[in-house]
Amino acid sequence: MYCDIVDLRSFYSTTLGRLAERSIAMALSSVWAGLPNERLVGLGYALPWLDRFGTEAERVFAFMPASQGAINWPPNGPSATALVFDEELPLFDSSIDRMLLVHALEHAENPRETLMEIWRVLAPGGRLIIVVPNRRGVWARFEHTPFGTGRPWSRGQLTTLLRETNFTPSAWSEALLFPPSRKRWVLRFHQILERSGRRFWPMFCGVLIVEAQKRLYQGLPVAQRASRRVFVPVLAPQGASAAREGDLTQR
């Protein structure tokens, strides 16, 4: 299940949430290559980083899964938020230059189908940036933060998944190397703990960040996927009246 939008907003309004946002932003800046006039989409809950990195983009959209819920964004101006199903994005083929996933892949029902759909909407040479909880990290073990929900990932698992879905990992980064504690002394010295963790225990970071590029040179057999949405509720088996009508028509 996805985190509820209310819980996500509440977490990022706390001191611990703001420090987590800052740590992830610093890690993103190390893998975020500038693309002039790019078309950028955030999937999941990527609003804090869309505000930071989407200022020079041609257009920016915030896609939020229906199970998570959505809020209006940006607060000033026309809304760029949409409720979506992550395996059927409302976009044309090759229409997006970069997609940022935060609080998304760890909650995906079928991560492979989600990445295949992202591959479809990314332009040739498009970039995908994924932020996921680290399986070895401390943050994935506590449920008082959104990073303690869903399925955590290891670097090897991400690499395998990306290659299976025709993406090539190109850059890695880590964030949240300080413990997810609400104690004042931990929050006060989080910068020292973050720098120390980056040097001494990077494998135990809270989140993994990977940038991958859409790969075009490998062809895969394409099978038409049936939609997993339920458009019309149907009773199965049908009632006695429907069965009687079927018998009458056969006669």
Image (cartoon, rainbow, N blue to C red):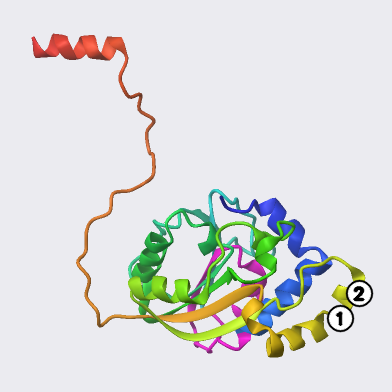
Q: Residue at x 49, y 81 (%)?
A: 211
Residue 22 is left or right of residue 71, and the answer is right
Mark number, residue 185 = 2
Which residue corresponds to the image point at 21% horizontal and 64% vertical from the top-left?
222
Nearer to me, 211 or 34: 211
Compared with 51, 35 (above or below) is below
Q: Is residue 150 above or below residue 19?
A: above
Examine the rendering and report whether any part of residue 42 can be seen: yes
Extreme-right residue of the structure: 184
User: Where does the image place residue 49, in percent across and percent down from the top left?
Assistant: 64, 74
Q: Are marks 1 and 2 in contact (CB under 8 Å)?
A: yes
Label 1: element kind: loop
Residue 211 magenta: no
Label 1 sits on residue: 189
Nearest the eye: 143 or 216? 143
Could you say where residue 173 lies in the image, as x and y percent from the top left?
58, 84
Q: Residue at x 31, y 21 (%)?
A: 237
Q: Is residue 70 left or right of residue 162?
A: right
- Picture layout, residue 123 above or below residue 149: below
What's the residue type where badge 1 is placed?
Phe
Q: Is residue 63 visible?
A: no
The image quadrant that residue 71 belongs to is: bottom right
The circle drawn on residue 16 is none
Displayed quadrant of residue 167: bottom left
Q: Amino acid at mark 2?
A: Trp
Q: Position of residue 156 (x, y in %)?
A: 47, 76
56 is within the stretch colored magenta: yes
In magenta, the rendered stretch is 29-57
Tell me the residue at 32%/24% (across/down): 236
